[in-house]
């Protein structure tokens, strides 16, 4: 069963709002619209020879909002997987502040 059958009807408007990079590691914060509700997340991307490794987590208020909508913990994990895929594939809007530490801008 896909996310649609688990209380998530759509994932839209994935945005990365801030990025801070040092070397091959980037920390980022963003938001997405999930079934009409804005959720916020933060994550890390590590750039390696095989491509980036990305990990994200929802902030606690977003996790609670989804749970109140009836979205199960398993569906939230699937949602995180889908958001991660979109970030890795560049299916997002990059907006906001970007800082590269250790390099002049």
Image (cartoon, helix red, strand yellow):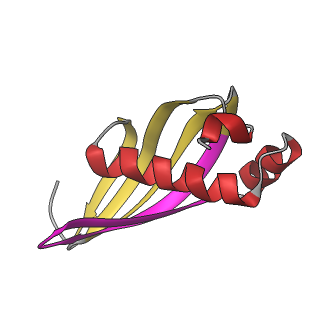
Relative to 48, is 80 on the left or the right?
right
Characterize the magenta stretch by its predominant secondary structure: strand
Residue 58 visible in the picture? no
Q: What residue do we see at 74% from left, 60% from top?
A: 73
Q: What residue do we see at 53% from left, 58% from top?
A: 42
Splitting the image into 4 quarters, where does residue 28 fall?
Answer: bottom left
Q: Count every numbered label the image shows and give the total.
A: 0
Picture coordinates of residue 30 (x, y %)? 51, 46
Report the front residue among 63 and 81: 81
Residue 30 visible in the picture? yes
Splitting the image into 4 quarters, where does residue 17 fall?
Answer: top left
Report the front residue among 10 and 36: 10
Is residue 3 highlighted in magenta? no
Q: Which residue is farthest right?
A: 68
Q: Which residue is farthest front?
A: 1
Using the image, determine if residue 73 lies above or below residue 23. Answer: above
- Give the extent of the magenta segment: 39-57
Using the image, determine if residue 6 lies above or below residue 20. Answer: above
Quadrant the N terminus occupies: top right
Splitting the image into 4 quarters, where does residue 57 fall?
Answer: bottom right
Q: Which residue is farthest left?
A: 49
Report the front residue among 36 and 70: 70
Q: What residue do we see at 74% from left, 37% from top?
A: 7
Relative to 31, is 61 on the left or the right?
right
Q: What residue do we see at 38% from left, 50% from top?
A: 85
Picture coordinates of residue 8 (x, y %)? 68, 36
Picture coordinates of residue 105 (x, y %)? 17, 53
Relative to 45, is 13 on the left or the right?
right
Is residue 55 highlighted in magenta? yes
Picture coordinates of residue 61 (x, y %)? 78, 52
């Amino acid at each position: 069963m896909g996310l649609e059958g688990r209380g998530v009807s759509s994932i839209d408007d994935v945005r990365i709002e801030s990025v801070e990079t040092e070397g091959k590691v980037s920390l980022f914060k963003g938001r997405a619209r999930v079934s009409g509700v804005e959720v916020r997340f933060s994550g890390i991307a590590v750039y390696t020879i095989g491509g980036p490794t990305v990990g994200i987590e929802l902030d606690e208020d977003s996790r609670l909002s989804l749970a109140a909508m009836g979205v199960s913990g398993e569906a939230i994990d699937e949602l995180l997987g889908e958001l991660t895929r979109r970030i890795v594939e560049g299916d997002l809007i990059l907006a906001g502040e970007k800082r590269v530490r250790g390099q002049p801008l």
